């Protein structure tokens, strides 16, 4: 057996656990919990993590080329999730640049990548994934955007099967990413992109730009066809809404 799974009934954050133990980990190790007391979301937000409603998992990978590729990495993870969910028979899965997985046009899963180490040499990456399995009404009230969960399906995938399939797919895709970069994922991304070919608005703090969404470049920036030609926009605080 090459990789380990650190399983907890309760933990503060599966991302936090792996980040604290990077010295003892091998690429491909995962951490899974039933409950997180301090689940973390993107942009410093909390990720409310009660029992029974989600899969909370984190995946460790070491990069020798530094942090520059992390932006592209979240798109790779999105492609991995799409592949796994579809392979388990889930229809209606799509991606929203740069980090969200949607089921029937509502958010199903989120990705949070955190890292430690050197910006330009060996760096340790932790990829956290939260997937809504079956949300309770009380919990659903706390979510400030349209959401979906896998209980909408006639047959709910088995949680362990989902976790194992995800670990294996991530290993395959991260190895491919290391060998070939993001260009190996561009067609998979476009095929799953809910906004491909659609008019969209990118919100960047006070500013916004409108255009037609036309895929991603090799760094993971979103490409927008605007009146001044096709332009690439990188992540950070950019969010996206249909125009
Ligand atoms: C988002 O804000 O959309 C990303 C949410 C990521 C949540 C997952 S749950 C498992 C892992 N551990 C955490 O503390 N956060 C991530």
Image (tube, grey):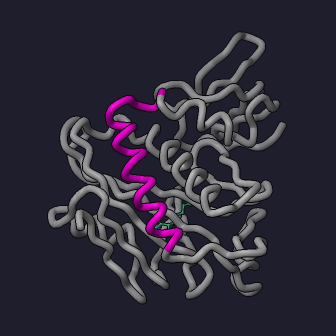
- The location of residue 186, given as percent across then percent down, is 56, 30
- Asked if residue 127 is positioned above or below residue 137 in the image, the reply reads above
Tell whether position 146 is magenta.
Answer: no
Q: Is residue 98 left or right of residue 206?
A: left
Q: Residue at x 40, y 80 (%)?
A: 12
Residue furthest out toward the top: 228
Q: Quadrant of residue 148?
A: bottom right
50 versus 183 height, above or below = below
- For the N terminus, the image quarter is bottom left
The picture quadrant where one finds residue 69 is top left
Q: Which residues are magenta?
A: 161-183
- The picture places residue 27, in percent across and down from the top left corner, at 26, 56
Measuring 84% from the left and 37% from the top, which residue is drawn there?
243
Most distant residue in the left direction: 23
Number of marks: 0
Question: Which residue sits at x=42%, y=53%?
Answer: 170
Report the predominant secondary structure element of the magenta stretch: helix
- Residue found at x 59% / y 86%: 52
Tell me where residue 146 appears, x and y as whole percent: 78, 63
Residue 206 in view:
no
Please state if 156 lies on the left or on the right of 163 as rendered.
right
Is residue 18 left or right of 238 when viewed as pictured? Answer: left
The spot of residue 119 in percent (x, y) is 25, 40
Is residue 176 one of those drawn in magenta? yes
Residue closer to the observer: 242 or 73: 73
Residue 81 shows in the view: yes
């Amino acid at each position: 057996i090459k990789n380990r799974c650190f399983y907890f009934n309760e933990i503060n954050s599966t991302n936090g656990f792996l980040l604290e133990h990077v010295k003892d980990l091998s690429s491909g190790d995962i951490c899974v919990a039933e409950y997180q007391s301090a689940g973390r979301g993107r942009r410093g937000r909390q990720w409310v993590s009660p029992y029974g409603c989600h899969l909370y998992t984190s995946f460790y990978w070491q990069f020798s080329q530094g942090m520059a590729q992390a932006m592209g990495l979240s798109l790779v993870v999105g492609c991995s999730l799409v592949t796994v969910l579809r392979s388990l028979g889930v229809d209606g899965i799509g991606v929203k640049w740069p980090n969200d997985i949607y089921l029937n046009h509502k958010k199903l899963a989120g990705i949070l990548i955190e890292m430690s180490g050197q910006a330009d040499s060996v760096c340790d990456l932790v990829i956290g994934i939260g997937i809504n399995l079956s949300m309770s009404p009380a919990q659903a009230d706390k979510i400030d955007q349209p959401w979906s969960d896998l209980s909408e399906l006639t047959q709910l995938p088995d949680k362990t099967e989902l976790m194992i399939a995800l670990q294996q797919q991530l290993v395959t895709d991260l190895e491919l990413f290391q060998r070939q970069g993001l260009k190996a994922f561009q067609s998979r991304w476009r095929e799953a992109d809910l906004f491909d070919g659609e008019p969209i608005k990118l919100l960047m703090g006070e500013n916004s730009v409108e255009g037609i969404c036309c895929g991603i470049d090799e760094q993971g920036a979103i490409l927008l066809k605007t009146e001044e030609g096709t332009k690439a926009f990188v992540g950070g605080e950019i969010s996206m809404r249909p125009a």
